[in-house]
Amino acid sequence: MQLIEVSDRRTVRDFHRVPRKIYAGDPNWIPHLEKDVEAVFDPSANSRYANGEAMRWVLRDEQGKLLGRVAAFVDHNRSDKEKQSTGGMGFFECTDDEKAAFLLFDTCKEWLMARGMEAMDGPINFGEKERFWGLLVDGHQWRPPYLMNYQPPYYRRLFEAYGFKNYYEQYVYHISTETQLPAILEKKFQRLTETQGYHFEHMKVKHIEKYAEDFRTIYNSAWGAAHKHFAPMTMQQALQTFQSMKAVIDEELVVFGYHDGKPVAFFIGIPELNELFRYVNGKLDLWGKFKFLYHRWRGKCRTIYGLVFGIVPEYQHRGLESALIMSVKQITARRNFYQSMYITWLGDFNPKMIRIVEHIQAKRRFTLITYRHLFDPQSHFERHPVLK
């Protein structure tokens, strides 16, 4: 087998050809936009390169046939805070061949060990967790939402045979917009807004810098309290995230909550773009943009994709979760356009949030696993701690 570093236009093209071979004939697979994947490996577009690095490879057999691909990356802001210095691997695709898969895993391991790492998580992204993160182990009968990983069932066997262990699971829930929410949610919403100094507003793109800063403030507070190895988001990263969504944002699907003017909660939703990107075959070139706009004009995008929501720790358990849900519900009832919503990225280490989502009768549709592999087999493995 031939392992080749991705270093020029030809090998970049091969990197994107691998999944097309793996998923040929799978009606539920929707290719990631090549531009979204390439942005991960572009130092000018990915701020993680300021204190990190990445490498990727493609694998061919002796006859030159593509067998697989993988990437490895180090984010020192994250790895330095781990009990074991931990790097990442992702964008793994491979034929059902243990020898080929193990060669790709070994390549990541050796590259990471050379940079002082003692473990690797995977499959993850060299960037934020809301995209390209985790291994799909349940929900293969559904088309995946935008930016979510989709992999064949046999990948789980390959990861676990190599020695990867389940670090945590993440869930994606689905709910119809016609679902009747419990009456208590309306009461909580009224109490917060009428008597307790809270107000909720939708994002205005013309003030994108303000909302990026509010998002960063809430995100750093909420995630910093929940994850002991958390690396705070910079304003540059927050603005970069919002700018990347600017072309597709539906302002009414982005809700911020304030208490006496202080940003304390957010819900970030976008139209579920894979309902449109399924027609462009991973390429948003001129023809791809035309097809995207055509199907958007036809009203093909009828699902909300809830990317992320967060609440400042001292404001949790005051009903803000209910208020954010009610704000989105009011939009869908008024506009009568969106038919359903995904609520994404709920870790199994956050049982309180899972209970809230299941209380509104959302149903679990996808399960993904984030694995961890310790390079020293004598090291003690621990799952992600449960949030209190």
Image: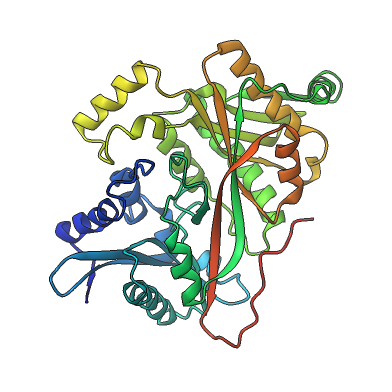
293 or 170: nearer the viewer: 170
Residue 87 in sight from this viewpoint: no
Q: Is residue 253 left or right of residue 64?
A: right
Quadrant hosting residue 319: top right
Quadrant hosting residue 386: bottom right
Considering every residue shown, the one lying at the far bottom of the view is 378
Image quadrant holding the N terminus, namely bottom left
Residue occupying image coordinates x 51% and y 82%: 375
Is 290 situated above or below 5?
Answer: above
Residue 135 in sight from this viewpoint: yes
Q: Is residue 295 left or right of residue 197?
A: left
Quadrant hosting residue 84: bottom right
Q: For the image shown, how many numbered marks are present on the structure?
A: 0
Residue occupying image coordinates x 21% and y 35%: 285
172 or 108: nearer the viewer: 172
Image quadrant holding the C terminus, namely bottom right
Q: Is residue 238 left or right of residue 282?
A: right
Is 291 situated above or below 80?
Answer: above
Q: Position of residue 198 (x, y in %)?
A: 77, 26
Q: Position of residue 131 (x, y in %)?
A: 47, 48
